[in-house]
Image (cartoon, rainbow, N blue to C red):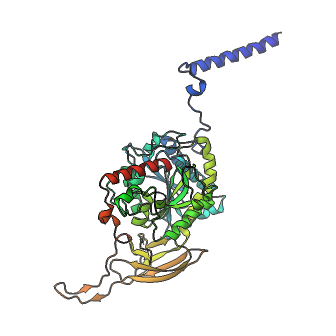
Amino acid sequence: MILRNTIVGQLLLLMLLYTTEYLCNAKTVSTEPLSMALPEPRAYLPDAQNLDFVYHDHEELTRFLRATSARYPNLTALYSIGKSIQGRDLWVMVVSSSPYEHMVGKPDVKYVGNIHGNEPVGREMLLHLIQYFVSSYNTDQYVKWLLDNTRIHILPTMNPDGYAVSKEGTCDGGQGRYNARGFDLNRNFPDYFKQNNKRGQPETDAVKDWISKIQFVLSGSLHGGALVASYPYDNTPNSSPLGAVFQTYSAAPSLTPDDDVFKHLSLVYARNHAKMSRGVACKSATPAFENGITNGAAWYPLTGGMQDYNYVWYGCMEITLEISCCKFPPAYELKKYWEDNQLSLIKFLAEAHRGVQGFVFDPAGMPIERASIKIKGRDVGFQTTKYGEFWRILLPGYYKAEVFAEGYAPREVEFVIVEQHPTLLNVTLQASKRVEGVGAGGPSFYRPMQAPQHYRPGVPPYATAASNDNGILSTISNGLNSLYSNIFG
């Protein structure tokens, strides 16, 4: 009897303690059902050393990046390219066996996530990619090769302010898509086809400054709202104002001189993805994409996109990766998205090692900085780094390269690309020859016509009157495109 009373007493005491603790912790008493009164539980708690499949706010994201950088100082370097309008850092994590300095002869590549604040799956995938790289370096030979031979820059969120006002579980709509001033950051870059008069934003200005300082070879921008790899051009010249109104519904491809390369890069991502290459439409009302890829303008044209800017202005091969049908799916689905995208994210970056790479030297063997190079027949060119390096992703075939530099005679070189490994091509430019000038200037030096800082194909179409963005038809067109992009990505 005493034992029984003791056990009963203990049970009563435990019940009393539990009830007291519950009442003390309860801030209010609600008459609503429990599921409505309490916030949705998080399946995991964020851990800086063991990243969980949850959405991380800016403080948690910052804490993870700082902790990872401290834990893996030989593989990572953390820096900020600027701040958002509301003062949040635009963090970039470098993952490489040489994280603090450029590795001569080895390409720089990048990923950008969350340019639309309400499309955060890419943001989380990039955090998991960072963790996978640093934790697998010593055990995965492919990852070790990639980090030993590539400098990978990862910007998990370009729009942290937009993310802060987005809502988990919202698959469509525009809440959080824009930055704190209401600008769509993927419509805020200079455009080749049309004059973009939208005021530059701190986030886009930071990215423009970033890519002007680093010669990125390859890039991916992660989005949500569809399941497709989309490649340049995103924009196209309008033949008439009336055509501009209906361009969303009668879009045609707008192909770059490197269309073969862009299709290949898109297919690399789509075919290594668990579902993308099947080309299944997300919804019955949305388009299906053959092999999971599309030309951007053929899907729907847009002005001021980031991928066109990377390519035309800097020769960086960037594609847009739409990786989730729902823009902001519930957190419990993130693990599935990681499993779907992990191999694609890694294999895509390795494509930076396809094509031709080398150096441009002067006769003394010193590197020539900012020498301009273009592949004959491909009018969008690129430049050498301060070490004289260059890279160009090309498919197997026979090519000619034209090389220019101020004060040097231009040169044309021929080379062949094979499938197995990149072609190494070193080019030596000779100084301009001295010739006798005529006129008041006296003796002078022959100088080839100075190449532009960045090659651009032909004359910008926006120089013609037909493509002006003025008038009611343009307003309607912009409204239709905005609505379409809010729905589909």
Residue at the image position 36 percent from the left and 72 percent from the top: 458
Asked whether, in this view, residue 54 is left or right of residue 439, the answer is right
Q: In which quadrant is the N terminus drawn?
A: top right
Give x and y (percent) for residue 419. 60, 74
Q: Is residue 289 visible?
A: yes
Picture layout, residue 140 above or below residue 7: below
Give x and y (percent) for residue 3. 81, 13
Q: Residue 446 versus residue 256: which sits nearer the camera?
A: 256
Residue at the image position 53 percent from the left and 56 percent from the top: 321
Picture layout, residue 27 above or below residue 126: above
Q: Residue 118 versus residue 73: which sits nearer the camera?
A: 118
Q: Quadrant of residue 49?
A: top right
The furthest residue to the right: 1
Give x and y (percent) for residue 116. 46, 48
Q: Is residue 199 visible?
A: no
Q: Residue 336 versus residue 404: which sits nearer the camera?
A: 336
